[in-house]
Amino acid sequence: MKIGIIGHGADKFTSRSKLVAIATIRFILHGKLKAIPLTDKIIVVSGHSPVGGIDIWAEEVALEHDFETDLKIPKQYKWDATYGFKQRNIDIAESSDELHVILVDKYPPNFKGFKFTKCYHCNSADHVKSGACWTARQARILDKTVIYHIIKND
């Protein structure tokens, strides 16, 4: 079973919410391990984000527990380039049997980037804008299971 785990970059987390995010990743993977037959294996699909965060933490947890990984590493750090972020995100959606999206509910106090009042990918105000929502939309189009995990950033 291929489990996609995607979400915000490291700059969107406080030190506390980072710990909660990593615990959430462990919970997802251990829950899947208990739910599948012993003959099956879990493969963690990650976008290997250049800004760290959920992608990298999912890879680290996978390695800690000897899960295989399927890394979708962009060849160019542009949206519409040859195997840039757009194609990488489509690849994550297509490759994952189940997609977990881990996001924070608000920006951390020290966040320096652009801020939006809602996520324009899914029109929700319950989490900070994330390209992971765009990927989740692609997974839903493909009739994949998508599960959101919203972490409080206080």
Image (tube, rainbow, N blue to C red):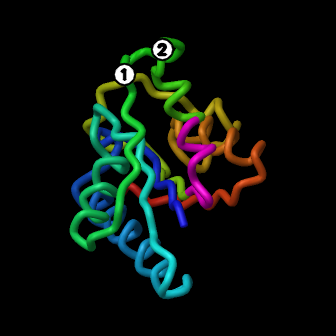
Quarter location, residue 146: bottom right
- Where residue 81 appears, as percent x and y from the top left, is 48, 12
- What's drawn in magenta, residue-wise? 91-99
Residue placed at 46% from the left, 20% from the top? 84
| Residue 77 highlighted magenta (yes or no) | no
Q: Is residue 141 left or right of residue 86?
A: right
Instruction: From this view, report whether residue 124 is shown above or below residue 145.
Output: above
Residue placed at 42% from the left, 72% from the top? 29
Check disc 2 and give the amino acid type.
Answer: Thr
Check disc 1 and give the amino acid type.
Answer: Lys
Disc on the earlier residue, 2 or 1: 1
Mark 1, residue position: 75
Report the quarter where the N terminus lies. Answer: bottom right
- Where residue 11 appears, as percent x and y from the top left, is 29, 39
Front residue (pair 98, 148): 98
Q: Which mark is residue 103?
A: none
Tell me whether circle 2 and circle 1 mark residues in contact (CB < 8 Å).
yes
Front residue (pair 58, 70): 70
Instruction: From this view, report whether residue 116 is shown above or below residue 25.
Output: above
- Where residue 88 appears, as percent x and y from the top left, is 49, 31
Q: CA distance from mark 2 to mark 1?
A: 7 Å
Residue placed at 57% from the left, 48% from the top? 95
Report the quarter where the C terminus lies. Answer: bottom left
Q: In the displayed image of the protein, which residue is found farthest to the top?
A: 81
- Where residue 17 appears, as percent x and y from the top left, is 32, 59
Mark 2, residue position: 82
Residue placed at 33% from the left, 44% from the top? 108
Disc 1, SS: loop
| Residue 97 highlighted magenta (yes or no) | yes
Q: Label 2 crowding class (10 Å Cα cut-off): few <14, some 14-19, many 20+? A: some
